[in-house]
Amino acid sequence: MSEGAVHLLQLLASGVVTGGIYSLVALGFVIVYKSTRVINFATGEFMMLGAFFAWTVMVGLKAPFFVAVAAAIFASALLGVLTERLVLRPLLGQRTISIIMVTIGLAAVFRGLAQIAWSGEYRSFPPIFPRAPIELGPIVLPSRQFYPFLIAVAAIAVVGIGFRFTRTGTAMRATADDQAAAFAMGIDIRRVYALSWSLAAMTAAVAGIVVGVLGAISPQLGAIGLRTFPVVILGGLDSIPGALVGGVTIGVLENLAGGYLDPLLDGTSVKEVLPFLVLVIVLMIRPYGLFGTREVERL
Amino acid sequence: MIIGNYKQTYASDEAVFRTPTVRWWMAALGIAVIAFPFVAGDYLLYLANLIGVLALAALGLNVLIGFTGQVSLGHAAFMGVGAYATAILATRLGAPFWISVPAGGLAACGAGMVVGVPSLRIKGLYLAIATVAAQVIFEWVFTNWTPVTGGIRGINVPPARILGVPLADDLRLYFLIQGVVAVHYLLASNLRRSRWGRAFVAVRDRDIAAEIVGVNIFQTKILAFMVSSYYAGVAGGLWVYFMKVVTPENFPLSLSIQYLAIVVVGGLGSIPGTILGTVFMTLVPEWLKLGTGLAGAAWPDAGSYLFPLRDVAFGSLIVVFLIFEPHGLIEMWNRLKRFFALWPFEK
C-alpha cells in the first residue's frame, strides 16, 4: 500500500476514535434533550466531575480501575438526580433563555467547586491498559486511544440497548414521543425526568473518564462539551443513532482537515473551526439534523 | 405622594420622566454621576469605566433577548468585531474616535445582520447553538486573520483625542464613556415605545401570532440582531480606547456568558435593570476579593481560592436568580419602591 493511502487510513482510524468519544458525549446531550427538551450546557462539567470521582477513588483509595469507574458512575447518577430535582424542576416550562442560563450557571458552579476540591492542576490516571500499540493491518493506534475507544463503544451499546429493550427505556421513549399520552398511560413523568438526568450524568461520567484516560484531568476538561455541539446538531438533537453518525462524521472530518488542510496553511488550525462551519451549514439546510424530529408549529 | 393617574395632555402621557419626584431623583442621579470621578479613587474610576462599557453591550443584548426573545451566545464576538473595526480605522487610517467608534458599531451591526439570518428558520435552543458557532468562528478569525487583526499580538491603539487633547487617563475617558452610555440608554428605553419596539415584543411573545397580525418577522428579528450588535460594536470601540489594545483573548465565550448573566440577573427586558445587573455583576468579584483578603488574615490560603470562588459565586447567582427571582434585580428594586411609596402610612 502506498504511503499516501496509509496516511489516509491512519487519519480515518483516529477520526473514528475521536468520533466514538464525541458520540458518547453527544449521547449525554441527547438523553436529556429527548425526554426533557433541555440542552444541558453543563454536560462537559458532568464529564469533568465523573473523571475526578474516578481519579479520586483510584488514586486516593488505591481501588482497581473498574471499581473506580463504577463508583464514579454511581456518584454521577446521584448528582444528576439532585440537579434535576433542585435546579431544573423549578424551571419546568420556563423560557429557553432561563433553561440555557441555568445549566450554564451550574457549569460555572461545578467548575469552581472542582477547582477548590482538586485544584487546577493537570492529573492523570495511573497506567491501566497494556502499553503496546495496537496494529490493525497497516494502521497503528496508540493503546491509550484504542482502549478508551472500546469503553466508549461499550457504553454507547449499553445505553442504546437499554433504551430500545428495557421497560424503563420504553417509558423514556414514550415520554419523548408524547408526554401527555405517556402520562395518561400511567408513566410517571417526573420519574422519567429524574432518570434521564441521572442516565445522562452517568454517560457523561464514562465519557469524562474516557477523555481523562486519553489525556489529562483538570477542571477545564469540560471544554470538550462545547466542541460536541456540531455533533448533536448534525445528528439531530433527539436522535441516538444521530449521535453515533454525527460523532463519527465530525471526528473523521476534523482529523482529515487536521491532516490535509492544516499543513497547507501554516500556523492556522482549520481543525478547530471546521466542525462549527459544518454546524452552521447544517442549521441552514436541515436544522433538525440528519435523524432529528422535525418540529411542526401550530398556534 | 402619587395617589392617582391624572394625565391631561399627550405630552405628559409620553414623558420619559413622569412625575416631578422622578425628575428630581434623576437630576440627583445625574449630578452624582458627574461628581463621582472627582470623589472616587483611581480604582473606582477604572471600575466605573468598565461598568460603562459592559453596560452598553449588555443593553444591546437585552434588546435582543428581553425585547425580542432571541437568545445569543455570541455577543462578545460582536463586541470584538466593533473593537477590531475601530482599532483598524484608528491605526491604519488615523480616524478620530467620533468616526471610528460609530464605524465599529456599524461593522458589528453588519455582522449581526449576517448571524441573524438563520433566526428565521431556527429558534430557541437551535438558535442559541448557532450563535455559539458564530462566537467560535469569529474568535477564530480574530486569531488567524493575522494581516488584518494582528493575530495573537493584537493591535495597539493610540488614545482618543478631542480638539487635540488626548483622552489618555480614566478621568477624561469617564465622561466620554458615560456620555455614550447615557445616549444609548435613552435610545433603548425609547425604542421600547416605538413601532419597532412593539414589534419586538410581539415577536417575543408569539412569533406566529405576530406574523398573522402583520408584523414582518424576518425584518423584525434581523433588526433586533442589528440593534443588539450595534450596541456591542460601540461598546467594543469604547473598549479599544479604554484598554489601549485589542487582542483575540478579550472576547471569549465566557464574556458572552457574562453578558447573559448580567441580563438575567438585572432583569430580562428591563433597561434600568441592565444597568443594575452590570453594576452588581461587576462588583461581586470585587466583594469576593475584599472577603478573601480579610479571610487571608486568619487563613493564609484564602487568596488562592479567589478565582474558583468567583466561578462558584457567578454560577450560583445565575441559578438562584432564575429560580427565586426570575424578574431580576429590577423587580427587587420595584418592590422596594412600592414599599416606600406609602411608607409609613400603609396599614
Image (tube, coloured by chain):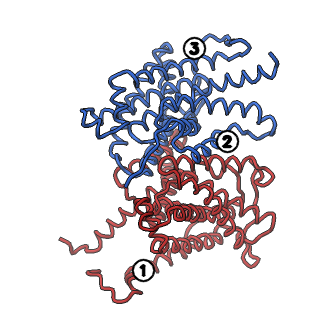
Chain colours: A blue, B red
For disc 2, the marked residue is A273
The residue shown at (68%, 63%) is B107
The residue shown at (27%, 81%) is B4
Q: Give SS at disc 2.
A: helix
For disc 1, the marked residue is B17
Q: Is residue B250 rendered to the left or right of residue A236?
A: right
The residue shown at (47%, 43%) is A294
Residue B105 location in percent, x, y?
65, 66
**Do residues under tags 2 and 3 come within 8 Å of each other at their CB atoms?**
no
Residue A48 appears in the picture as rendered? no
- Mark 1, other Cα within 10 Å: few <14 / some 14–19 / many ≥20: some
**Do residues under tags 3 and 1 come within 8 Å of each other at their CB atoms?**
no
Question: Please, is residue B135 above or below residue B299 in the view?
Answer: below
Chain under disc 2 = A
Query: Label 3 sits on what residue type?
Result: Ile
For disc 3, the marked residue is A128
Question: Depth-wise, is mark 2 or mark 1 nearer the camera?
Answer: 2
Real-space Cα distance between discs 3 and 1? 70 Å
- Mark 2, other Cα within 10 Å: few <14 / some 14–19 / many ≥20: many
